Amino acid sequence: MPTLRQLRLYWKPVVFLAASLPLLRLAAGTVGLAGVRLGANPVETIQDSTGLWALRLLLATLCMTPLRQISGKAWPLQFRRMLGLFAFSYAALHFANYLFLDRALDFAEITGDLTRRPYIIVGATALLSLAALAATSTAGWRRRLGQRWLTLHQLVYPAGLLVCWHFWWQVKKDVTEPLVYCLILLALLAWRAWWARRARRAAALPAAGAA
Ligand code: HEM
């Protein structure tokens, strides 16, 4: 098992670099570096890639607690905040790409999109939730909010569901890809519900014994 020092010195930079790679690839493709190409429609490539990586990193964030529960080791929690902040950063880039490159800040187009493409409202709600989580993810906010911090951070579950809905809704024909992500999210939520029920039962047992 890695020590806290090894985690800080080696594993955190490795995970940081791995999570940055999709962004570095997009940056290289934008300036035509190292032969990387973004295809015939670079704006669409950036839109899809940032959206997908935001979702993947959100799911990776949600995997950390079950990993800790299954392994009995605390190290997965060391990566949770970093992965969550990466998920939010990709989602923010996804939104900025839509706003500046896809719609060129044309507010008539954007308001028209809200009725033509209502999945954007779902995505925006998810983004606002992720922004609230990112803004309050520091130790200071955790201390300040106390028990309410845990309640607030449960917002990550509806945010995940909204993102899956956003993805599903904008797919035109084949829903296989969003379906896979939805199933992974549902499995993670089911695990959490099962674990919480198990913990409640375990806590009730000594009380029942004493009675
Ligand atoms: C205001 C917020 C958002 C806007 C305006 C927005 C907009 C869009 C647009 C225009 C597309 C492409 C649709 C198409 O190809 O026809 C898209 C796809 C997608 N978005 Fe968003 N989105 C938002 C929030 C989010 C968030 C918060 C996430 C994830 C955390 C996300 C994940 C995705 C995914 C996974 C796709 C599908 C990519 C693919 O087809 O490969 N979006 N979004």
Image (spheres, rainbow, N blue to C red):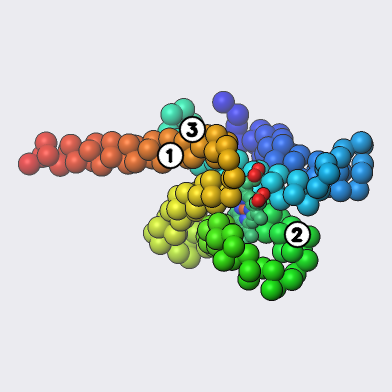
Note whether ligand 1 is within 8 Å of mark 2: yes
Which sits in the foreground, 102 or 19? 102
**Residue extending furthest toward the bottom:** 108
Residue 140: % across, % down: 55, 62
Which residue is identified by label 2?
102
**SS for dot 2:** helix
Q: Work out whether mark 3 precedes mark 1 in sequence or the reverse, and give the earlier one.
A: 3
Q: Which mark is residue 67?
A: 3
Given this view, does label 2 or label 3 mark the residue nearer the observer? 2
Up/down of 40 relative to 67, above or below = below
In the structure shown, which secondary structural element does the residue marked by tag 1 occupy?
helix
Mark sitting on residue 186: 1
Name above or below for residue 170 compared with residue 116: above
The answer to whether residue 74 is visible is no
Residue type, numbered disc 3: Leu
Whole-percent x, y for residue 191 in the image:
39, 36
